[in-house]
Image (cartoon, rainbow, N blue to C red):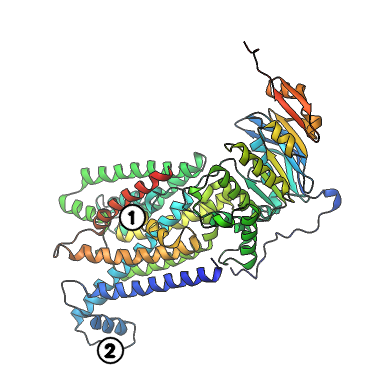
Amino acid sequence: MSTRRVSTRLLLLIGGGLAALLASVAFAVTIGPADISTADVWAAVTAHLGLGESTLPPLRDGIVWNLRMPRTLLAAVCGAGLALCGAVMQSLLRNPLADPFVLGVSSGASTGAVTVVVLGVGGGAVSLSAGAFTGALLSFGLVLVLSHSLGGSTDRVVLSGVAVMQMFSALTSFIVLTSADADTTRAVLFWLLGSLTGAGWGDVLLGTAVLAAVLVVCLGYARTLDAFAFGEEAAAALGVRVARTRLVLLCATALLTATLVSSAGAIGFVGLVLPHATRALTGPGHARLLPVTALAGAVFLVWVDTAARTVIDPQEVPVGVVTSLIGVPAFVAVLYRGRRKA
Amino acid sequence: MTDSTTETPDVEPAATPEAGSGLRADRVSRRTDGRLIVDGISLTLRPGETVGLLGPNGSGKSTLLRLLAGILTPSAGVVTLDGRALPQVGRRATARRIATVEQHAHTQTELTVREVVALGRVPHRRAWASASAADTRAVDAALERGGLTDRAGQSWHTLSGGERQRTQIARALAQEPRELLLDEPTNHLDIQHQLDLLDLVVSLPIATVIALHDLNLAAMYCDRLLVLHEGHVVAEGAPGDVLTPSLIKRVYDVEAVVTHDPGHPVIRFLRRSPRP
């Protein structure tokens, strides 16, 4: 097991993952009610990047550039970000069932979103995304304060997350059931379940920027995360500044999760299942696990979203419903495997 | 962020002789929930010696080891490494000098023996850098020392208790420490593995503090003993001087007969009630 061979294997995995992601995006954009070929996609993309003249009629160009392209890319960004956050959370909290939503970020986002949409807080000047983002940060702050006052250990973080999540979920249900009309409820429900409908370039660019920053931070902490395998005290004995590491990584992943949830809702199970699937491929070392799981999450969600918007055409299924339909059996498999080591 | 440009101020200037070298606790205390767990203990660890830490459960052995490792900070007093207080030395630099083996290591992560041992290189590696030749050499040497070379690829979860402890000791050796702290490493091991493990520990050219329950093992393997009772040191010195029937009665509240084998004392405990 020489260093060089491991690095080559990692480069192969990342190269393969990037190629798969490019191919998936290119292919996913061609799928849909309007008949669009890969050549059309290529023409539209090069034209908008200023590399050529578009030969497409404006309508078709619009479908590619303004509808399918941002949606597919946002799927990739969300998949990558959620899988990355899940992998970091599982190692940091030493809990194989942790996911990006374990800190209550998604339920806080939901409450924020319904506060804006249903109660009309902000008088229309505040978007659903902004409301969701504010709610997410509020709930994460609450989890931090609560877990810190309970002693700060990782099991306290998980318990605080669960408590805050329950509270905000109840609050969301309360607001929706008491104040929303049927149409608003439907719109909110769709978003709550996780949906990439209405993705725009703004979401894509913001998501990509935050994802890139958080990925760099997490990769910088890859060796440190390895040291958490035998617990926080063992990590401290290996020279890790545990409290600082925990705070940096919790804040980084919460920020990324909040950004993604505010554009696409709480897409469940990607962050729980993808890291486990990837670990089987890369082993537990985070320098390999983190980049590969991000790529795997991106490819996975591009395909799941394509399925979500085409399978029962012309109706659309929220992508979160599809990920959960796939995710629940995988979740059970994780529990089943974990039984051996309990 | 590159590995070559920045070296954290870990490399300490040569310590002055009067500041003392090696690991040293100076009247350290640790208070938890208003109770003194460790009360004013001093210890100077000499190069290469094996110091046994004795005392009943709750006497403060584990807490003292954590204080020595810098995992806990003392409520009073100071732990120094080559004359500098541990917080000044820094966590990473401390972990390159002092390695710790816990009583019971547990993980849910699917790791091989080699991966566990390689964790010992964490304090030596910078972020972003891949394993260096020195890392690989240290891991190979530690596996060899622990007799685990042919098990390197095996899953941690398939190991027996004794093999797990040997793996943890190999991980500690991969840190290339000059001080090694072990918290009851022979717990839950059968007698053969207890002796194997202690033989391994005392064969290392590393200053070691080892918490032990078994007085006879302590007498056989340690150069010096420190006996704790309710957070205080009640006796300190060579096993033959420390392990007397009166001390055993005082600390453990049991009757014992101590005989002297060549080299070390042998303790025989007596029944509370006469045989019927």
Q: Secondary structure at mark 2?
A: loop
Q: Residue furthest bottom?
A: A53
Q: Is residue B185 visible?
A: no
> Real-space Cα distance between discs 1 and 2?
40 Å
Location of mark 1 (residue):
A131
Percent position (x, y) of residue B19?
Answer: 82, 49
Percent position (x, y) of residue A123?
Answer: 28, 55
- Whether residue B273 sits left or right of residue A41 in the image: it is right
Q: Chain of mark 2?
A: A
Q: Residue furthest left?
A: A314
Q: Quadrant of residue B236?
A: top right
- Tell us which disc is closer to us: 1 or 2: 2
Q: Is residue A262 visible?
A: yes
Is A265 in front, or is B231? B231
Residue kind at label 2, given as amino acid type: Glu
Q: Chain of mark 1?
A: A
Q: Residue at x 76, y 22 (%)?
A: B245
Q: Residue at x 34, y 87 (%)?
A: A51
Question: Does label 2 lie on the same chain as label 1?
Answer: yes
In the image, residue B25 above or below residue A287: above
Q: Secondary structure at mark 1?
A: helix
